[in-house]
Every structure is written in structure tokens, then in C-alpha cells.
């Protein structure tokens, strides 16, 4: 009873946020509301016991993408251009699509139905065999990095390709730093002090999430984003130049490629032991030890690529802007 | 006996924390302008959430969960006032004037388009 009520309340929040986003023309508040939408989705996912997904949603959807959207706003306009076209046709299209989607849900199994195909097909095998075949407590990580290693390799490659695409689009127009204003937030003493205190724990937490992914919620994707968040906070508060001195863009691009290379390389190594691609069981003395090592390496590759993509995307966006001095506000 | 005491303290903390969060949310909606809105949002949330976390800590006993809650509490204790400060500072530097900070005799001005929340 309480579960259903909480679900309904959260879904209502989601719908209200979505309508509110539709009604706004100030893009700044649209970006903020998208962050709210992501946080509510993350809460909903926690409530559905999908903590790994919720973690990713909170870190990526509410954290990094809000920062990137704000960087984009800083480059473009803060208000939506009024549209002169008729609104009737889009409304009809959306209405029909919505009807089709609702019609589609009629065929779906009921929520939580134990005889639903998703619970009867491969899931029981993953649940029963993870303990003996992979030997790690977090089944999500076992599925993500081992059983479905190919999918995750594909996802990592997608992120890699997207990062390269953003860099290609924006790299040509990066302006040379003027050297006039190196730091952006000189007057924010409180912010600078608190940021300095927090960056260490954030990096530590990212490492915990990275290497604890076998045992609890977390893994390469979440850790990569948290790692990147620490550097992006540093760049936001102390200026892009200071961040570039700490982590040069060149190094980030190397890490960007090295992550995918590590992931793919682990698969190639299993070839040499006479196993299938991405079958880690040959990497260690026993099959489970090999799985452990393989998952650890693969997740580390994911984390490297994800954090490098986030940091280099932020560098590319922020590099378009001249840092704002205090007197220019 | 000690369990009853712990439960009572924990529930008192949880109830006070929830009350503060609700009051803060009401204040956020009801207050007239940007700076006064920041006041309930920043102050009550920091105390309210930390009280709720303390109440949860008493429920979780001596375990890893307690340590995690403690860390979350410490994190929020620093970040929440900092973000409030940063938002207020940004608004002040950007030139947003408090709505009712004028001399009381003057008639109230209509809301300017710069008003926050739009």
C-alpha cells in the first residue's frame, strides 16, 4: 500500500515536472527542472530497488548533464525563441504517439508479475549461477561486465565515439586563452575553501564506487562521472586554466582512448588463453578469480573512458567562453 | 529500556527534522522575494536533513550504515550552506535587489521582470 502510494506520488512529481518544463521559456529554469526530473527519476529507481541505475541517473542526469547544459546556455541564449508555427500539428502527433504507447502497454505484463518474460527467460540463470560462475555479490555488475560484456563494450564505445564527436565539433573553434583573467571566481572565498576541502573526499568516493562495484551499487560508469565531477567542480571554481594545469587536455584525451583499449584488450587477452572474446575465466588461477580480475579491469576501462569524456567535453564547452571576471557580472 | 529511549529520541529527531523540512518548503513558496526565499530553503534544510539523518543513525545502530549516514550528514552540513551562500552571492553580484528593502514610506513597487523564480 505504502509502496504504491510512494510510486504514484513520485510519478505525479515526474509528470508535474515534465509539464512545467514544457510551459517554460526561460531555458535556465528548464535546465534546472531537468535536473529535478533526473533526481525524481533516481528516487523512483531507488524505490524500485534499481540502485545501480538510480546512481547513474543521479550522477549523469542531474549532475554532469546539468553542468553541460548550463555551459551550453552560457554560449547561446537564455530564452527560448518564440515559435511562429502552428502548435496543432505537433499536438496531434504527440497525442497519437501517446495513444499508441498506452495501447502498447496493454500487452505488457502487470508490474511485478513473476511470470513476466523478463523474469522467466535468462534472469533466473543469472541469479542462480552468478554465485558459482562469477563469485561476486552484486548480480548487476556480473550481468553488466561479464554475461553482457559485449553490450557494455558497445556502450563504452558509444560514449567514446560521442566524446570524439563533441571534441571534433568544438575543437576547431577553441579560442586561445587571453591570459587576462585566469581565475573566474576570485570573490568566492567560501566556495574556494569548501571546494578545496571537498575535492579529496569526492575523488576518494569515486575510487570507492569504482572498486566496490563488485560488492555494492556502483561501477565504472558511476565512478567515472563522480571522478569527472571533482575535476569539473575544480574547473568551475578555480577557472579552466587551473584545471588544465592540473589535468592537461592532452592527458585526458589519452585516457579517453586508453579506457576503451583496456576493455577491448582484456577481450583479446582471453583469445590467447584459447577462450572466447571477453570470457575472463582464463585470466586467473581459477575461473572465478579470472572473472574477478576481468570485471575489475573492464570496469576500470569504463571508468577511465567515461570520466575522460566528461572532463574533455567540459573543457571543450568551457574553452569556448572567456572566463568572466568579477566586475563583469 | 535503552531500546525504548533510543527509539523515542530517534522518532523525536525524525519528527523535528521532517517538520523543519516542511516548514522550509512552505517558506520557499510563501516568501515574497529571492533572498527571503533562500532563507527558509537554506537554513531549515540544513538542520532538518541533518536531524533526519541523526534519527536514522539512531535506528541503524553501530554498523557501516551509521558511518555512511554520518558522512552524508557531514557532506550536507558543508555543501548546503555553501550552495545557499553561492546562490545568494551570485544574485547579489548580478545586481538583484531585495524586493522590500526600500524605505517603508514609499509605495510598494510592482514586481520587476528580474524577479527570481520566473
Image (cartoon, coloured by chain):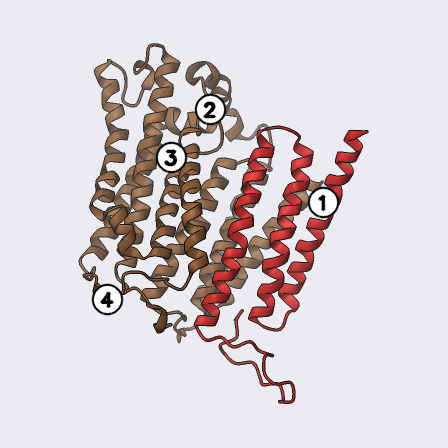
- Subunit that carries the residue with mark 4: A
The crowding category of the residue bearing disc 4, from other C-alpha atoms within 10 Å (few below 14, some 14 to 19, many at least 20), is few
Question: Which chain letter matches label 3?
Answer: A
Q: Residue furthest right?
A: B1
Q: Which chain is brown?
A: A
Residue at the image point whose x is 52% and y is 77% from the top: B97
Question: Along the horizontal axis of the image, is A217 left or right of B59?
Answer: left
Label 3: which secondary element: helix
Please give the label number shown on residue B13.
1
Q: Quarter-wise, where is residue A26 in the image?
A: bottom left
Q: CA distance from mark 4 to mark 3?
A: 38 Å
**Nearer the observer, disc 1 or disc 3?**
1
| Circle 3 residues within 10 Å: few <14, some 14–19, many ≥20 | many
Q: Which residue is mark 2?
A: A122
As measured in the structure, the alpha-carbon distance from the residue carrying label 4 to the one carrying label 1 is 52 Å
Chain containing the residue with disc 1:
B
Mark 1 vs 3: CB contact within 8 A: no
**Is there one chain holding both mark 4 and mark 3?**
yes
What residue sits 43% from the left and 53% below the top? Answer: A193
Q: Is residue A101 visible?
A: yes
**Chain letter matching colour red:** B
- Give me the disc on residue A220: 3
- A2 to A153, vertically: above or below: below
Pointer 2: residues within 10 angstroms few (<14), some, or many (20+)? few
Amino acid at each position: 500500500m505504502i509502496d504504491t502510494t510512494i510510486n504514484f506520488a513520485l510519478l505525479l512529481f515526474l509528470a508535474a515536472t515534465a509539464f512545467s518544463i514544457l510551459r517554460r521559456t526561460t531555458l535556465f529554469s528548464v535546465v534546472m527542472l531537468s535536473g529535478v526530473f533526473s533526481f525524481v527519476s533516481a528516487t523512483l529507481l531507488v524505490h524500485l530497488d534499481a540502485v545501480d541505475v538510480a546512481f547513474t541517473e543521479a550522477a549523469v542526469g542531474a549532475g554532469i548533464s546539468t553542468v553541460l547544459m548550463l555551459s551550453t546556455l552560457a554560449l547561446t541564449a537564455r530564452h527560448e525563441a518564440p515559435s511562429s508555427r502552428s502548435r496543432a500539428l505537433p499536438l496531434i502527433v504527440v497525442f497519437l504517439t501517446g495513444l499508441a504507447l498506452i495501447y502498447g502497454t496493454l500487452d505488457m505484463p502487470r508490474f511485478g508479475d513473476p511470470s513476466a518474460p523478463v523474469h522467466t527467460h535468462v534472469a533466473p540463470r543469472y541469479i542462480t549461477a552468478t554465485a558459482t560462475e562469477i563469485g561476486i555479490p552484486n548480480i548487476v555488475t556480473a550481468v553488466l561486465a561479464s554475461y553482457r560484456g559485449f553490450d557494455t563494450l558497445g556502450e563504452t564505445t558509444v560514449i567514446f565515439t560521442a566524446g570524439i564527436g563533441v571534441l571534433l565539433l568544438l575543437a576547431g573553434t577553441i579560442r586561445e586563452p587571453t591570459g587576462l583573467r585566469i581565475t573566474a571566481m576570485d570573490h568566492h572565498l567560501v566556495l574556494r575553501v569548501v571546494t578545496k576541502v571537498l575535492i579529496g573526499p569526492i575523488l576518494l568516493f569515486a575510487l570507492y564506487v569504482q572498486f566496490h562495484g563488485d560488492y555494492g551499487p556502483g561501477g565504472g560508469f558511476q565512478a567515472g562521472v563522480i571522478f569527472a565531477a571533482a575535476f569539473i567542480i575544480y574547473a568551475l571554481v578555480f577557472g579552466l586554466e587551473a584545471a588544465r594545469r592540473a589535468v592537461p587536455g592532452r592527458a585526458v584525451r589519452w585516457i579517453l582512448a586508453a579506457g576503451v583499449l583496456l576493455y577491448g584488450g582484456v577481450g583479446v587477452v582471453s583469445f590467447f588463453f584459447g577462450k572466447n572474446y571477453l570470457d575472463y575465466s582464463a585470466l586467473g588461477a581459477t575461473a572465478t578469480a579470472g572473472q574477478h580480475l576481468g570485471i575489475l579491469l573492464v570496469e576500470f576501462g569504463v571508468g577511465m573512458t567515461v570520466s575522460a569524456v566528461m572532463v574533455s567535453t567540459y573543457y571543450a564547452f568551457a574553452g569556448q567562453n572567456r572566463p568572466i571576471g568579477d566586475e563583469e557580472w | 529500556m535503552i531500546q525504548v529511549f533510543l527509539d523515542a529520541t530517534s522518532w523525536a529527531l525524525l519528527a523535528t527534522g521532517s517538520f523543519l523540512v516542511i516548514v522550509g518548503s512552505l517558506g520557499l513558496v510563501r516568501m515574497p522575494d529571492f533572498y527571503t526565499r533562500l532563507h527558509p530553503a537554506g537554513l531549515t534544510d540544513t538542520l532538518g536533513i541533518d536531524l533526519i539523518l541523526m534519527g536514522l543513525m539512531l535506528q541503524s545502530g553501530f554498523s557501516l550504515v551509521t558511518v555512511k549516514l554520518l558522512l552524508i550528514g557531514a557532506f550536507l552540513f558543508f555543501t548546503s550552506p555553501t550552495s545557499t551562500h553561492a546562490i545568494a552571492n551570485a544574485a547579489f553580484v548580478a545586481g538583484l535587489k531585495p524586493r522590500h528593502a526600500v524605505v517603508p514610506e514609499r509605495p510598494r513597487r510592482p514586481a520587476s521582470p528580474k524577479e527570481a523564480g520566473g
